[in-house]
Each structure stands twice: as C-alpha cells, then as structure tokens.
Image (tube, grey):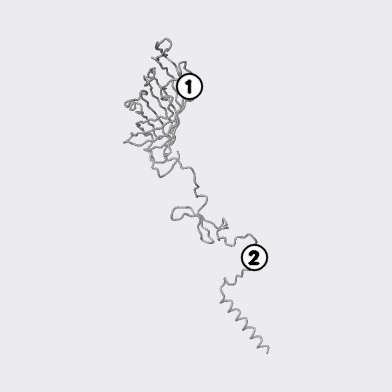
C-alpha cells in the first residue's frame, strides 16, 4: 500500500513538470487589473509618457533629427530642432547697391504746357534690398501769368533739398523689381516776384500797376509716397512715384503766400507724381532668393 502511494506521488510530480514545460514563459506573467483613478486618459498612446533614458537621437532618410523610443521603436521629431514661424530673414547683403536717378517728370510736363519746375536728381543707398536712405536735390523755376488773372508770378531758378528713406516690400524677391513706400522731408528758401498787378479805381476811372519785388519765403514740408520700379536693361531701371505732400512750416510773406514753391509744387495741390530713370551700381552680388541669410 505504501509503495502504491509513493508511485502515485512520483507520477503527479512528473505530470506537473511536463505541464509547466509546455506553457509559454510569458503566460506565467499575471497582471492584476487596476481600476484607474478618475480623470485618467484611457485612450492615451504609449508615447504620451516617455522616459529620457529610453530615447536616442538619430537622423532619418530626409535629414531630419528624430528621437527613437528604444522600448516601442516609435520615431518622433526632435522638438528642440523644429523651427517655429518667424519673420523672414533678409537674403541680400547689408551693403547691396547704390543708385542715382534723374526725375524727368517736370521736363516732360513742361513740353505739355506746365509752367513750373526744371529738374531733379536723387542718390540712394540700398541696405539688404529692404531699407533705402534717399537724398534728392533739384532746381525749381517759374515765370507764369495765370489765365484771367491780373498778375505775373516769377521765381528764379532755386535749389531745393529732400532727405528720407524707402521701405521695399519685395526685399526677398527679385532685386530688379521694387514696390515700396517712403517718406521725405524737404526744405527750400527762395524769393519770388509778383509784378504787373493791375488795380482798377472805379471812382477815378483809372488803372494802376503795382509790383511786389523780392518776397522771401522758407518752407519745410513732408512727402508720403508709394512707388514702383522695374528693370529696363542691365543696370538701368525706371520708376513711378505718387506723392502726398503737406507743409510743416512756412515763413510769413508781406505780399501773401507764394503760388509756386520749388520742390513742393503749387500750394493748392496735395498730390503730385514723378517719373525717373535710375542707374544702379551693384556693391555686392545678389544672392539667390531661395536661401534666407542675415549678415
């Protein structure tokens, strides 16, 4: 009886050992279900919580820096290497070009009957093809008897000056073309004559002629402008400007306000224009517009 009991025990032990060898090792791990706390995201991804020790940095086939989770094998961009949106950088070098211009608006308009203006030249310095300081110098003149008026207004050739800057909105585009806004501050000091002023006396039935020689005036004014410029050929280009003008300071004149002001134009007009031919001296070669770079 004792021998049978011992044999039965050996048989049971052998069967248990055989069963244990047939069951996969991972089946031996038992996970006790845990009730999640309130507010836990049950749909979160494996990569929602990562350990820094499990991440390695590598370069993918497109040259991007990515982080690889060594546990799951998933890849994700390196957030430190992802560029955020920023103001476009300036492509062209700081010392880009210098340009001289000749305004032919007044000479052409005088051919069509305009009675004032002579000519103007400009010089500008291009920084990054974006910021453009400008100096303008010209000469104004008139000798005009308005229709149905009883006087002659005359200004001898007088210089005027303007200084300001343009902002090129197309600074990262083809530098042969510009669309810009600008501001100018102008100054002129001149003298003018009002002659042949006829005065009728109804009482005496006589006509008298009065002259107001050499009236002096100084004027400070401002122009707000918008312009376009396009390439003609090589370093030559042409451009149009539309200007809004306003007087900032004007000296008093005993005989009344001047009708024409060199560099400003007629006092009753708030808008004027110009048309110029430009020659550009390239200081630095233009860079391709595909790769922004700051100096």
Q: Nearer the viewer, residue 149 or 162?
A: 149
In the image, is 176 to the left or to the right of 71? Answer: left
Number of numbered labels in the structure image: 2
In the image, is 112 to the left or to the right of 49? Answer: left
Q: Report if the CB atoms under discs 2 and 1 are less than 8 Å apart.
A: no
Which quadrant holds the N terminus? bottom right
Work out whether mark 2 precedes mark 1 in sequence or the reverse, and give the earlier one. 2
Which quadrant holds the C terminus? top left
* Rendered location of residue 138, percent (x, y): 39, 24
* Residue sitting at the far right: 2
Secondary structure beneath dot 1 equals strand
Residue at 64%, 65% in the rendered image: 35
Label 1: few (<14), some or many (≥20) within 10 Å? few
* Rendered location of residue 266, percent (x, y): 41, 24
* Rendered location of residue 86, percent (x, y): 49, 44
Secondary structure beneath dot 2 equals loop
Determine the image quadrant of residue 21. Answer: bottom right
Label 2: few (<14), some or many (≥20) within 10 Å? few
Q: Which residue is mark 1?
A: 250
- Residue 211 vs 232, above or below: the answer is above
Mark-to-mark CA distance, 2 and 1: 86 Å
In the image, which disc is placed on residue 186? Answer: none
Q: Nearer the viewer, residue 238 or 143?
A: 143
- Residue 187 vs 75, above or below: the answer is above
* Residue sitting at the far bottom: 1
Q: Which residue is mark 2?
A: 35
* Rendered location of residue 234, percent (x, y): 32, 36
Pair 2/1: label in front: 1
């Amino acid at each position: 009886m004792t021998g049978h009991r011992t044999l039965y025990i050996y048989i049971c032990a052998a069967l248990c050992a055989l069963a244990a060898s047939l069951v996969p090792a991972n089946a031996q791990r038992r996970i006790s279900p845990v009730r999640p706390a309130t507010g836990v995201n049950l749909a979160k991804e494996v990569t929602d919580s990562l350990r820094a020790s499990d991440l390695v940095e590598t370069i993918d086939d497109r040259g991007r820096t990515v982080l690889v989770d060594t546990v799951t094998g998933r890849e994700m961009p390196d957030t430190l290497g992802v560029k955020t949106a920023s103001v476009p950088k300036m492509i062209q070098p700081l010392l880009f070009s210098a340009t001289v211009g000749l305004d032919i608006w007044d000479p052409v308009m005088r051919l069509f009957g305009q009675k004032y203006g002579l000519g103007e030249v400009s010089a500008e310095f291009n920084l990054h093809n974006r910021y453009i300081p400008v100096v303008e110098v010209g000469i104004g003149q008139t000798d005009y008897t308005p229709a149905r008026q009883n006087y002659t207004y005359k200004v001898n050739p007088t210089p005027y000056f303007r200084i300001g800057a343009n902002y090129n909105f197309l600074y990262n585009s083809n530098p042969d073309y510009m669309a810009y806004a600008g501001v100018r501050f102008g100054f002129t000091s001149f003298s003018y004559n009002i002659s042949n002023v006829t005065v009728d006396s109804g009482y005496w039935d006589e006509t008298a002629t009065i002259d107001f020689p050499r009236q002096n005036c100084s004027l400070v004014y401002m122009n707000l402008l918008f312009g376009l410029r396009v390439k003609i050929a090589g370093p030559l280009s042409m451009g149009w400007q539309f200007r809004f003008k306003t007087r900032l300071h004007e000296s008093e004149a005993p005989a009344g306000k001047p009708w024409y002001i060199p560099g400003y134009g007629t006092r009753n007009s708030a808008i004027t224009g110009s048309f110029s031919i430009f020659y550009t001296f390239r200081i630095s070669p233009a860079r391709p517009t595909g790769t922004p770079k700051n100096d």
